[in-house]
Amino acid sequence: MRAALLLNPRAGTLLARPELLTLIPAALRDAGLEVLEVEAGGDLDTRLEAALALQPDVVVVGGGDGTIRTAAARLAGGPVPMAILPLGTLNLLARDLGLPLAPEEAAAALARATPRRIDIGLVNGEVFLCQSVIGLPNRMGLHREKVRGRGGLAPRWRVVVALARALLHHPPLRLGLRTGGGEMRRVWSRAISVVNNAYDEAPGHFFHRPRLDTGRLSWHVVRQFDLLWIARILTSMALGRWRSQPGLISGEAETLDILSRRSHLRVMNDGEAMLLRTPLRYSIRPRALLVLASPQPAMAAPPLPMAAEGLA
């Protein structure tokens, strides 16, 4: 199998382990793949076009959820499958596909992977494979990005201080929600998460989606979002009854419109921040992306590395 390999050099795991630039291609070759390495110059879109010009059987993308999102936007609807090497912080999609989270093990596992079609979420035409978030968690993600690749305690301490200020002073958003073209529902919220397929509710499953092809969005409105609420929701997930958490409004639909008096809202799709014009129009493309996944779904999602990610 001819595999075009694209690695995001700014991915957190690569910054911590630069030797993976050599180990990953070697692991792919040991797994029986013919590796077609794409030049590192240019942005990801340019490198994707160069990879497809090689006419590969699969495009292997190494990075975090944001990198995978960008690649999926280009490969959706096409015949070439995407394979994922988890090199980010959360690697939510890799977890849901049952892939090993160690990069070398994930590369070796591609020899046993099978093709699978999954849904793609959209908001105003922008793709997300896992979740799209509005409100306070965006600020938390932006502060985290500022120290990516920096060592020492000082940058991390500045992030902690910035997050504490955001939790104390970030005002709630006044928004309107409309599902399926129905009546509008007004809400005050500090955080909204729109998920591509629903999270599981089983003991020990943290932000795990057992299905990626139901063709439905799942949305969650959080009225209060602070450290105490985060601790409560994580505890509830560990016990398998998080949907009954006070202050949480949830629902499912094929389409969702979010209306605001603001002309634009900051949205974070799979960790990638963007400013989008309102109203925000969410939809889903059923089974639009061909991926390589574990031949047998994982029985349980591994625990997330950090609880401070907020409403994942």
Image: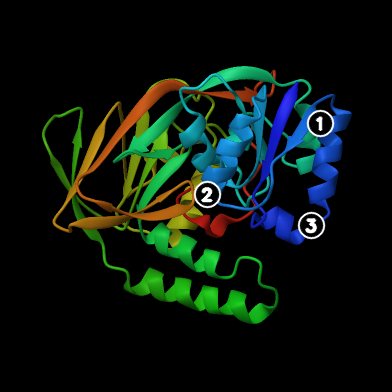
Relative horizontal placement of residue 44, taking residue 107 as reference (left or right)? left
Q: Position of residue 243 (x, y in %)?
A: 40, 38
CB within 8 Å, label 3 to label 2: no
Above or below, 145 against 283 in this view is: below
**Colouring style:** rainbow
* Residue behind mark 3: 18
Q: Position of residue 146 (x, y in %)?
A: 53, 69
Query: Mark 3, residues whose alpha carbon is within 10 Å: few (<14), some, or many (≥20)?
Result: few
Relative horizontal placement of residue 46, taking residue 95 as reference (left or right)? left
* Residue behind mark 2: 234
Q: Which mark lies nearer to you, 1 or 2?
A: 1
Residue at the spot 27% in from the left edge and 56% down from the top edge: 265
Q: Which mark lies nearer to you, 3 or 1?
A: 3
Q: Label 3 to label 2, Cα distance in Å?
A: 33 Å
When asked about the image quadrant of residue 219, the answer is: top left
Q: Position of residue 36 (x, y in %)?
A: 74, 34
- Quadrant, the N terminus: top right
* Residue behind mark 1: 108
Is residue 221 visible in this depiction of the protein? yes
SS at mark 1 in the image? helix
Above or below, 237 against 41 in this view is: above
Is residue 197 visible in this depiction of the protein? no
- Front one among 63 and 46: 46
SS at mark 3 in the image? loop
Number of residue marks: 3
Residue type highlighted by circle 1: Ala
